[in-house]
């Protein structure tokens, strides 16, 4: 709404269930937030509200086909958001599997395979570094609950040529 107008009323309700329940009881068609009340009519569901507001403030595409394309993108975003949440939920389980595998080789104090650096170590560091640390030269917070993986990440990151490359490489937005 703020894209097209500075005049908006955006009241927020605390996230405590009893406060939400008291404020929306009898108003919200689905008993949940968000909701938008317009001239006494209550709309619910995020994307229904978004489409209504887009139409009201001139952000909706012009033709029905373009509107369908916009809805397609919104639906794709919803699908992707669900996948991201699934991945977040599955991440600790998979990190535990990987830590258990690392532990089988020298108690997890060295590398994933054998007694020297391999492409498996580089791939693991690369995944953890980009997925969780966004390319920064840090051990990601998500890995800190897995001490062997955190140690592995730190070891790989501090190999002299890797460390030098991390410090000198151009930044790439991911």
Image (cartoon, rainbow, N blue to C red):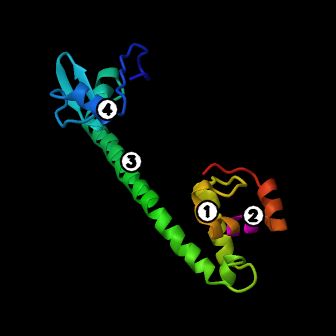
Instruction: Residue 166: give x, y in percent of width and height.
Output: 77, 58
Residue 72 versus residue 99: which sits nearer the camera? 99
Residue 157 numbered tag: 2
The first of marks 3 and 2 along the sequence is 3
The residue under label 3 is 77
Residue designated by label 4 = 50
Read off the magenta span.
152-157
* Label 3 vs label 2, nearer the camera: 2
Distance from disc 2 to disc 4, alpha carbons, whole Å, reads 44 Å
**In the shown orientation, is residue 174 left or right of residue 73?**
right
Q: Nearer the viewer, mark 2 or mark 4?
A: 2
Residue at image mark 1: 128
Are the two marked residues, 3 and 2, in contact with CB atoms closer than 8 angstroms? no
Tell me the crowding category of disc 3: few under 14, some 14 to 19, or many 20 or more residues within 10 angstroms, Cα based. few
Q: Where 38 falls versus 28 (above or below)?
A: above
- Name the front one of labels 1 and 4: 1
| On screen, residue 84 above or below 27 | below
Where is residue 31 drawn, in percent x and y? 20, 35
Marks 2/1: CA distance?
11 Å
Q: Earlier in the sequence, mark 1 or mark 4?
A: 4
Question: Which mark is first along the chain, 4 or 2?
Answer: 4
Mark 1–mark 4 Cα distance, whole angstroms, equals 35 Å
């Amino acid at each position: 709404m703020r894209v097209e107008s500075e005049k908006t009323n955006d009241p927020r309700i605390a996230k405590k269930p009893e406060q939400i329940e008291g404020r929306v009881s009898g108003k919200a068609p689905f008993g949940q937030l968000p909701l938008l009340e317009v001239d006494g009519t209550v709309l619910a569901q995020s994307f229904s509200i978004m489409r209504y507001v887009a139409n009201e403030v001139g952000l909706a595409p012009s033709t029905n086909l373009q509107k369908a394309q916009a809805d397609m993108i919104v639906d794709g975003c919803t699908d992707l958001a669900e996948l991201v949440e699934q991945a977040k939920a599955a991440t600790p389980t998979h990190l535990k599997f990987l830590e258990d595998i690392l532990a089988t080789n020298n108690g997890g104090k060295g590398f994933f395979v054998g007694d020297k650096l391999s492409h498996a170590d580089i791939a693991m560091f690369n995944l953890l570094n980009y997925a969780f640390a966004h390319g920064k030269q840090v051990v990601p917070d998500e890995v800190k609950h897995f001490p062997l993986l955190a140690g592995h990440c730190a070891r790989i990151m501090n190999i002299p040529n890797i460390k030098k490359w991390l410090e000198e490489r151009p930044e790439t937005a991911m």
